[in-house]
Amino acid sequence: MAGSHGGSPKSWLAVLVILVGFGVGGVGLCVGPSWIMFWVGVGIVAVGGLLALMVDIFSDVIIDAPREPLNHGG
């Protein structure tokens, strides 16, 4: 996967868990607000954050090769 910003499936799983948590918390705020649902979302985000730390998500970044700037004849 050289030259790509893609990550490993385990990193994407952590991101997915965090996104689900944000979604649950956001729905909880919009439907009442339902504070129990909001805090469940916060808990899911926390679990996703721990999962991200366990899979070392920050070392999963693949940096593209440097790009040449476009010369528009100016």
Image: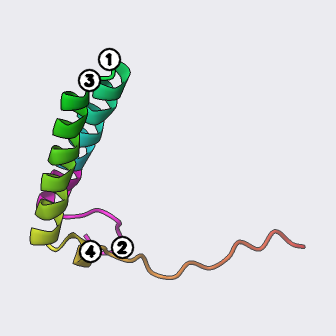
Type of residue at label 2? Gly
For the residues bearing labels 1 and 3, Cβ distance under 8 angstroms? yes
In the foreground, 22 or 39: 39
The residue pinned by badge 3 equals 34
Q: Secondary structure at mark 2?
A: loop
Frontmost of labels 2 and 4 is 4
Q: CA distance from mark 2 to mark 4?
A: 17 Å
**Amino acid type, residue under disc 4 in the picture:** Phe
Which residue is at the front of the view, 69 or 39?
39
Q: Which mark is residue 31?
A: 1
Q: Is residue 58 left or right of residue 67?
A: left
Q: Give the colour scheme of this rendering.
A: rainbow
Q: Is residue 55 visible?
A: no
**Amino acid residing under circle 3:** Ser
Residue 74: x, y in percent?
90, 73
Asked whether the residues under the numbered discs 1 and 2 touch, taking CB atoms below 8 Å apart as contact, a structural biologist would say no
Residue 42: x percent and y percent? 22, 45
| Viewer-side label of 4, 3 | 3
Q: Residue at 24% across / 78% down in the picture?
A: 59
Question: What numbered label is drawn on residue 14?
Answer: none
- Residue 7 covered by magenta stretch: yes
Write down the residue under mark 2.
3
Instruction: Look at the numbered disc 1 and give the secondary structure of its residue.
Output: loop
Which residue is the site of mark 4? 58
